[in-house]
Image: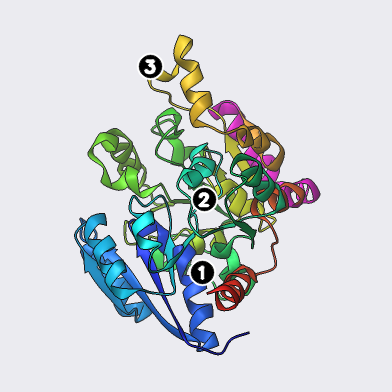
Amino acid sequence: MNDKNICILFDVQELYYLPQYLPVYHEFLNRNKGNALFVFYYGKFDTIIKSIIKSEKLNHVWVENKSEANNYYKKEKADWIFFGNKFPYLDEVHKVSKTIQLGHGVGPKSSYYTKSDTPTTVRFVEGEYRTNRLKSMYPDNNFVDVGFAKLDPIFNGNAPKFDLESLGLDSFKKTLLYAPTFYPSSIERFPKKFPEDFKDFNIMIKPHYFSLSQEKYKKQRQLLEYWSEYDNVYLAKVTDYSIVPFLATADLLMSDASSAIIEFAALDKPVIWCNFLQLRWNYKGIFAYRFKNRMDKDYDEYSKIAVQSDSYKELKHNIKEQILNPTSLSEIRLQYANKLAGLLDGKSSQRIIDYLLKNY
C-alpha cells in the first residue's frame, strides 16, 4: 500500500449525509494518511451545521450551490470526493479527481438503485445482494461491497446514548422509537391520542428532517408537535441530525418506508413495520402504479425483517407482544439485516479507507 498522503473531500448537500460520512472521516483521521475537508452548502441549517463543525472540529468550506461546488472541486483536485447522491458535473470533476457515492440509507425506495444512473468512480454498497443487483443493472459501473458505515459506531461501542431523564423521560420505562419517513408516511394515520395509548412507555419520535422543516409537511409537523406536549414523549429537534443515538437508546422501533427499519433490525432489536400509509390521491386507485414505481421490490422484504402492522390497532397489539418477547424473531431478523445492510461487524469504514488508500 502506497504511503503517500491523500486528500479527500465530503460533499454535504444535505445535513443527513453526515451520520454516514463521519465514521469514515474518523477512520481516515486514525490512519493519519492525509487531509479531509467537508463542503457544506449554505441554507436554512447553517447555524446547526456550524455547531457540528465546532464539535467535530471539521475542516470545511462553504458553497452556494452545486455549480460553485464543481468549481471548487476542479480547483482543489482532491484524490477522492464523496457524494451522497447524484451530482450533475461528474464528467468535469472526473478530469481531476476520483469520486465515490456513499448513500445515506438502505431503505426500499427505488431511488436507492437509480442513484447510479450517473456513475461515480466507485459506489460503496451494503451487502452482496444489493451489490449483485446494482451490477446487473449497471454492468459497466464499479460497485464494492463494504457494509453500512453509519452503524459502525454502535457495533464498536462508540455511539452516544441519550440520558432519558435529561429528556424528561423515565429511565425505568422501556423506550419506543417512532421513526417515520416524510412520504409515504404513517404519521397522518396515527391518532392524536397516540402517546396516551402507550403511557407505560417512553416514546422518542425521530421523523425525517423534511417533516420538521419543509412547508408542504406542515400538517405532519403540527401533529408531531402536539404529541411532543405529552410527558412521555421526546420529539427530535432538527439539531438531532443523526438517528444513531436514537437507535442505540431505544428498545423497540416502529417505522414505515424508512431505512431505519433495516438499521434497527441490524442491532437485533424488535421492529414494527407500520404498513398503513397516508397516500396522496395521485398514488391511489388507477394511479397505484406510481407508488409501486416509487418503492423498490425490496419493500416486500420488510414483512420478513419486521412485524407487519396493517392498522394502528394491530400496531398496539404487536408492540406489547414484541416487548414481552424481544428475541422471538432474532434469527430471521439478522438474516435479512445481513442481506439488506451487509456485514454487521463495525468495520465498514475500515474497508472504505482501505479501498481509497489502495486505489487512489
Is residue 153 magenta-colored? Answer: no
Cα gap from disc 2 to disc 3, whole angstroms? 29 Å
Secondary structure under tag 3 reads helix
Assign the N terminus to one quadrant of the image.
bottom right
Q: Nearer the viewer, residue 338 or 322?
A: 338
- The residue tagged 3 is 281
Residue that label 2 marks: 177
Up/down of 44 relative to 351, above or below: above
- Residue 263 x, y percent position in the rendering: 59, 54
Q: Please, what is the three-letter code of the amino acid marked with disc 3? A: Trp
Q: Which residue is mark 1?
A: 161
Residue 123 occupies quadrant: bottom right
* Residue interval drawn in magenta: 310-334
Q: Is residue 31 left or right of residue 241?
A: right
Determine the residue positioned at 64% across, 53% down. Answer: 341
> Marks 3 and 1, Cα distance to the nearest angstrom?
40 Å
> Does the image show residue 321?
yes
Circle 3 crowding by C-alpha within 10 Å: few under 14, some 14–19, many from 20: few
What's under tag 1, amino acid-wise?
Lys
State the separation of the CA atoms marked 2 and 1.
13 Å
For residue 93, which quarter of the picture?
A: bottom left
